[in-house]
Structure formats: C-alpha cells, structure tokens
Amino acid sequence: MAAGCGRSERRGRLVSRGPDAGERLRRLLAIMPWLAARGTATFEEIGERFGMDVATVENELLLAACCGLPPYSPDQLIELVVDEHGVTANVPDYFRRPLHLTAADGFAMLAAGQALLAVPGADEPTSDAGSSSGSGSGRRGPLASALDKLADVLGGSRGVAVELDAPPLLADLRSAADDAERVEVDYYSASRDEVTTRAIDPFAVFAERGHWYVSAYCHRADAVLHFRVDRMRSVRPTGEHFERPDPASAAVPGAVFRPGPGMEQATVVLPAAARWVVETYPTTSVEDLPDGSLRVVLPVSGRAWLERVLLRVGPEARVEGPPELADVGRRAAARVLARYAGATD
Amino acid sequence: MPDRLARLTNLVALLLNARRPLTLEEIAAELDPEAPYPGADEARRQAFERDKRVLREEGIPVEAVSLDGEGGRVGYRIRPEEYQLPDLDLTADERIALHLALAAVPLAGGWGTAAGWKLDGGDGGAGGAGAAGDGVPDVAALAALPSVEALPSLFDGWRRRAPVSFGYHGEERTIDPYGLLFRDGFWYVVGHDHAREALRRFRADRIEGKVRVGAPGEFEVPEGFDPAATLPGQPFRVGEGEAVDVDVAVDAVLAAKVTAEVGEPAVREWRPDGSVVVRVGVTNRAGLRSWVLGMLDHAEVLGPPEVREDVAGWLRAVAGANAGAAS
C-alpha cells in the first residue's frame, strides 16, 4: 500500500516528541539519501542505523510523506511506499544527496581518522589498495587514502593532529587481549612508587586522554583493574588462555581514574602559579583565596602521587590537613635531596 | 499544532528549489497551509527567525540577500551546491575504514554520528543500491577523545581559512587557525595571533564563551604546516632560549619509560644496575625541574653544576618550608 499522506486527518494529531526539532531534521535529511541509495529498507533497519525506535521511524517517515514543494499536491510530496519488504521512498532529487559535512562532522571525522592512524597497525594496507594508489607511497591503508579523498571537503587532511603515546609494550598487550592470553607483567605503580609482578587477563586495550590503558582481571588483586601500558616494564606470555567476559563488564573508556568514596582527601593551599594542579587532577573542591592562592581538596590516589605534586609545586605549597599528611612534602624533599649530597659531575 | 519538523522540512525544500531569494512574505505565502507560519507579522518573523537558526545550527547554508540595498527587504535561499555533500568517490574499503575510525574513536557528545550517516548517503548513480553501507563495523572503542565545545568552530575557521576570535584568560584574541592538536589529553588550537603578530597556541578547553568565525579565505596555512611540530613534547623544551645540555640519571625502574620518552640517541650511558644517563636539551629550567621531580628519588640531575644546584636549592626550600609551623 502507499502510505498516503492522509493530510486532513493529521491536523491536530501531531505532537512534539523526543529530541528537538534540529536533531529530528538532521536525522530525516540523512535518512532520505540513505533510503534513496538503498532503495528499500524495513523500519527496523532504519531504526538500527539511525538510532531510533520503530514507532519513531514510522512517525517521522509518515511526516516526511506529507512534505515537499508547493502546491503540496500529491505529485509534489515525498512518496513513500510500504509493503511486506519494508519501505521504499521515491526521494526527490533535491533530497537525494546528504547535507554537506558540518564543522562538527568534519572535525569528528578528521580527529577520529588521525587518532586511528596514530595507532600502530590500525590502518594496514589491503592487497588491492596498495596497487591502486599508484605512484605515491604504495603502502598506505584505506583510512589514509580515504582521508586524502576527504581533503577537499574537509579543507585539507592535516588540520587536525592527534598524538597518542606509543609505549613499547602496546603491541604485546594488544595481541594478548586479541588472543585472550594470560600474561605476566612487571608493573610500576606510580601512586605507590613500586614495581610488582602480577598475572593478568587483558580484556581490552584502549587510549584515554592520550594514554594507553589495559583493562584486565588481575589475579593478585582479584579484581578488574586499569593499568597504564607505559608503566609496564615487561610482558611475558604464559601460554594459558582465559574466558573472555561479556563485553559489558570489560573495559569501558571513562572508567580510568575515579576517586573512590573512601579515598584519603588532602587539603592543600597552592600559590596562584600552581593552578595547573586543578586543571590536571580531579579535585573535590577549589576555593579562591583573596591573595590569589587556592585552597583545594584533592583525593589522594597514593602517597607518592602527593609527594610528586608537592615537590613540583614547591615551597609555597602548604598541606593544611589531615595532620598525618602535613609533612609529606618536606620528607619527600629531604629524601630526594639525599641524592644531591655528593659532588656534581 | 502541526509538527514543526514538517514546516522545517518544507522550508528546506522550498529554499533549495528557489530560483531567486524569497522574502519572508513569499515564503509564508508558499509554505504548506497545514504547517504554516503564524499570520501576525511579529509572530511570523519570530517563528521564522527560530527556524532559520535551527537550520543554520544544523549546518544548512541559508543565505540572506539584501534585495533593495541598505535596509531594504531581505531574501533567503539555499544554494544546492553549498547544501549538498559532493560525491566522495570512496571505495568500499575506504568507506568502511572511515566508519571503523568513527566507531573506534568516539567523541563525547556523539559528534561523529551524523558524519557516519552521511558516508552512506547519495544516489551514487547506477551503482546506487550497493552504495548504502550494510557493512558498518561493530567495534569496541579503542581511543576516547574529549570533546570541547569550541572545537567545531575552531575547525570551521581552519576549514574555511577564516580568522577566529575568542576570549582567553579574560582577553580577546583573534587568530588565523592553522590547525588543531591533541596532546597529553588536551586539545590545542595553533595559529597566527593577529595582535601578537606571532604563532601562538591555546588550550581549547580554556577558551571562554563562544568562538566567532570571521570571513572565509582571509589567510593561507603555511605550506607543510604541522600543528604537532609547534608544541614541544617535554616541559623542559618549552621556551625559546638557547638550549643547555643537561645530564639526568634515571633509576632502572623508570629507565625504559624515560628512554622511550626522550629517544634512544639521548642515552649517554647504560649502567650495570639498569639505570640510565640521558642528555637532554633544556630551554626551560622550571620545566626540567618539574620533569625530574616527577620521578621523585628515581632521578637526579648530574650536571651542569648550576642546573644541579638549581634543583637542589629548590628541594632545600621545600624541605625547610613551614618547618615547625602548625597547620
């Protein structure tokens, strides 16, 4: 049957629903070219591709079927045909091309592309891509060549640079995670300033805030922990394999450092020049003092972490509490100073 | 109440098909009476302004043209060649690679979502039916990048070669944006600062308020410009003075990490206990101090003597600070 517009019945029935008008328009203007390219799709397929439930898909498409050009006679409306195979849209020419990339689209595409290019091995050339790129460097992967093709619509391909660190053991951990192989690692814990050896089951390797992490079940801690890959000193295969957990319990970026409720809190007064501390680490509270200094409450992830912060800020930092932390900076300074007791080279 | 989406969709269709700019009165007269603008002048104007704002926020290039010179009537249209995404001419592999990148590197706020939709659209001529991507890969996120509100506008400035203006530490700055850089968890914009007449970089998350994008085509990005090359990677390389070579001993526990950071050529000596001595060019003493002290007692400045004394003096000050003060 043709999903006719049923124009007069619709009067007074339509309500504003869900997302705002801009977001709905964005979807609709994307669905039409997609349908035009595909020919036919079910409501379910459309819903899955564009993140909508079936009822919403139906509503939006029925609404689109009432749109078009003056005088809005049936021949000027977007034509929708629904049958047992799904919906076929006869999309008018002017809606057959997607809207040009917006600034946010272009930024997201270039940033994501450059980030993935920064991951070793993430853009392997496919067998025919190498030969088709001809005289240029023949070893480029499909992502690199796609970004080159997008350069015209994006304004170039080098406007966004993404750096992820490239720790030496990244590849070892990624292949262990891919193969579900248990590994033994020597791990340097910066917050405790110690190296420990542990068997871990690496579930997933991911980058967040520019650093690589592995989310793994740690047999020593009997818990799923996130380890910084650049703090691994060695990774040894064990030959044993583990059962992969269901994806929901494995790593999700965003879970890296969250101050726990029971974590010790330090109240520190920092000089104005040490505002970087507030911008770098999670804080519980920040208070601007009249002289430009800051009183901050910081969750303390480890004694060594606090030492590091205090030494870097310098003599003007003052720990107000708790009392057992008041001396941390002075003691750390004295300990490091011991290395400077000898003569210089 | 008719659905506003119907009016917006009809408005886009009408303006895309307009042979000449249409006035608000013409638009209101033409639009579907089932999803019309209000009859009263003021209400109509306001409703149209709201719709126009939504269209522009969605990136639809609504052009406003003055019809009878200064202060006269304004006409509106959308030029199809500006609205439509050109044919990207991507192979199947390339399209999948882009989808994969968008899925593997999500940006907070879902900025990449609509970009992915657009990759699959387009009538693609004869091969149209096969062009729509069924092969959108389902992959876990590999790297998460933070979103900062200023980024799309800064990117737009770069893309159009349009100067951008914004507030930064309470001051108004205007730059020609040469590029964006993500490093150490932060986004930076790098560009030519008009007032300073020099290359400057700004943390995007410290930009205050909205970024205003100026007229396009106002500058050229220097040939071969690389945003990454403008920002020294290590704190001790920030600054423009003459570099001083400084030797730093690093204990075994951090030796591999530091070697990876400064590069193998900087290594002067591997010691039997696994520790390493690296020589680094320092243009920023405070940055060096911060870097070395970040390693606590696992690192030591060996020389030259005045640099070593600089760190030791700092440590003596910290060790003696507020000694005995009740706090």
Image (cartoon, coloured by chain):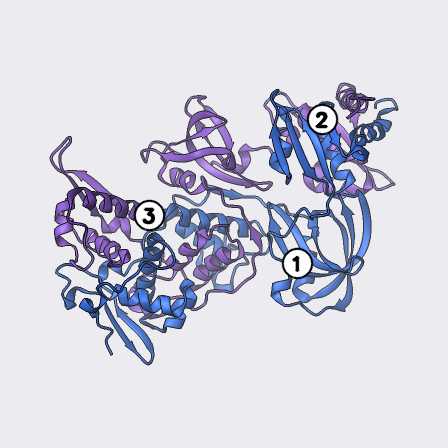
Chain colours: A blue, B purple
Res. B59 mark:
3
**B136 sits to left or right of A269:** left
User: Are discs 1 and 2 located on one and the same chain?
Assistant: yes
The answer to whether marks 1 and 2 mark residues whose Cβ atoms lie closer than 8 Å is no
SS at circle 3: loop
Residue under the point 36% across and 74% down: A42
Which amino acid type is shown beneath numbered disc 2?
Ala
Distance Cα–Cα, label 2 vs label 3? 48 Å
**Of the residues shown, which amino acid type is indicated by label 3?**
Gly
Callout 3 touching callout 1 (CB < 8 Å): no
Measuring 23% from the left and 51% from the top, which residue is drawn there? B80
- Helix, strand or loop at label 1? It is helix
Q: Are marks 2 and 3 in contact (CB under 8 Å)?
A: no
Tell me the CA gap for discs 3 and 1.
39 Å
Neighbourhood count class around disc 2 (C-alpha, 10 Å): few under 14, some 14–19, many 20 upward: many
From what the image shows, is residue B296 above or below residue A40?
A: above
Few, some or many residues within 10 Å of mark 1 (<14, 14–19, 20+): some
| Residue A87 at x, y percent in the picture | 31, 73
Q: Secondary structure at mark 2?
A: loop
Measuring from the top left, give residue B110's x and y in whole percent.
46, 53
Closer to the camera in the image, A142 or B46: B46
Q: Tag 3, which chain?
A: B
Residue B30: x %, y % from top left: 13, 54
Q: Nearer the viewer, mark 2 or mark 3?
A: 2
Q: Quadrant of the N terminus of chain B?
A: bottom left
Q: Is residue A172 above or below residue B292?
A: below
Residue B19 appears anywhere in the view: no
Q: Which residue is mark 1?
A: A174
